[in-house]
């Protein structure tokens, strides 16, 4: 059974850098896209970006200038880096697997981590 | 960006009721529409993909329909465990996946 687990600091200073890692267990990372999605308290879901195991990335245009995703398949991990954070970046951050056209299917987030709360402090 | 708008934003219903939630896209997305259920403090869970295909192990009381810009999620007979927030999400534009704002389903 595939399991995703987010890890990283729960508190980041304003103007600093948010760094999170997602560890994938129970299956290979190959042939899937790996994503970060966030949710401010009491609000909806915002897609941040995705990375393929080859390292190919796509980012939300509204965050593109501040976001970097990376992947380390030897450790079965992928990571999020968000620069110049503000209070608006305070949210629960989820990692999620995207299953889609590489299997002849439509894209969908089929496996999610439990989420990790990140607070940006002034 | 493709905007996704759900209605209603919240809904009160009773166990056994039939409930329908609507999702509209700002442009045609064919059937590239997914539905998720989220319970408090938990991650979203995929219910339906490609507008009408039930994800494995999701109860058959859940169904989805629609294409183009108008989609619905129907729960045929509400069970206590169905009270949650539901989100639609378009996968038509791979440059930018977007979600609806959510519909909170509460017990009447």
Image (tube, grey):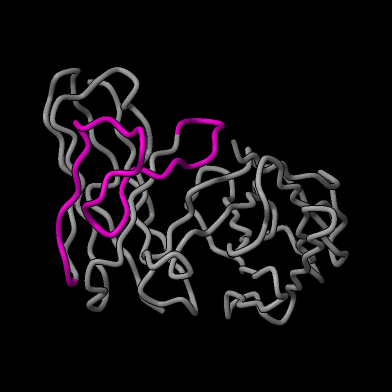
Residue A16, given in percent of the width and then of the height, sits at 88, 64
Relative to A7, A41 lies left or right: left
The total number of labels drawn is 0
Instruction: Look at the image and tell me in which quarter the C terminus of chain B lies.
Output: top left
Is residue A28 one of those drawn in magenta?
no
**Which image quarter: residue B88?**
bottom left
**Which residue is located at x 31 percent, y 48 percent?**
B48
Give residue A68's quadrant in the image. bottom right
Given residues B41 and A32, the one toward you in this image is A32
Q: Is residue B61 above or below residue B45?
A: above
Q: Would you place residue B58 above or below residue B50 in this image?
A: above
Q: Is residue B45 left or right of residue B10?
A: right
Highlighted range, magenta: B39-68
On the rendered image, what quadrant is the N terminus of chain B found in? bottom left
Residue B43 included in the magenta stretch of the image:
yes
Question: Percent x, y for residue B16?
Answer: 14, 19
- Is A27 left or right of B64, judged from the image as shown? right
Where residue A52 appears, x then y in whole percent?
65, 70
Residue depicted at x 32% and y 34%: B58
Residue name at image x 41 percent, y 45 percent = B46
Residue A3 to residue A12: above or below: above
Q: In the image, is residue B63 above or below residue B79? A: below
Residue A74 percent across, percent down from the top left: 84, 58
């Amino acid at each position: 059974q595939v399991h995703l687990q987010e890890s990283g600091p729960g508190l980041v200073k304003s103007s600093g850098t948010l760094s999170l890692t997602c560890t994938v267990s129970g299956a290979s990372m190959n042939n899937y896209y790996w994503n970060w999605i966030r949710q401010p308290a009491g609000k909806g879901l915002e897609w941040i970006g995705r990375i393929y195991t080859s390292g190919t990335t796509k980012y939300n245009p509204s965050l593109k200038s501040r976001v970097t995703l990376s992947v380390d398949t030897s450790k079965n991990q992928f990571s999020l880096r968000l620069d110049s954070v503000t209070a608006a970046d305070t949210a629960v951050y989820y990692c999620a697997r995207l299953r889609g056209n590489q299997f002849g299917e439509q894209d969908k987030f089929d496996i999610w981590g439990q989420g990790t709360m990140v607070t940006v402090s002034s | 960006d493709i905007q996704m708008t759900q209605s209603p934003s919240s809904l009160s219903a009773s166990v056994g009721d039939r409930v329908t939630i609507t999702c509209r896209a700002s442009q045609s997305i064919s059937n590239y529409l997914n539905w998720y259920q989220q319970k408090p403090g938990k991650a979203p869970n995929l219910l339906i993909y490609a507008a009408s295909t039930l994800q494995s192990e999701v109860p058959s009381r859940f169904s989805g329909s629609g294409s183009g810009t108008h989609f619905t999620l129907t729960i045929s007979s509400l069970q206590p465990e169905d009270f949650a927030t539901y989100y639609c999400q378009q996968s038509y534009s791979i440059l930018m996946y977007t979600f609806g704002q959510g519909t909170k389903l509460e017990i009447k």
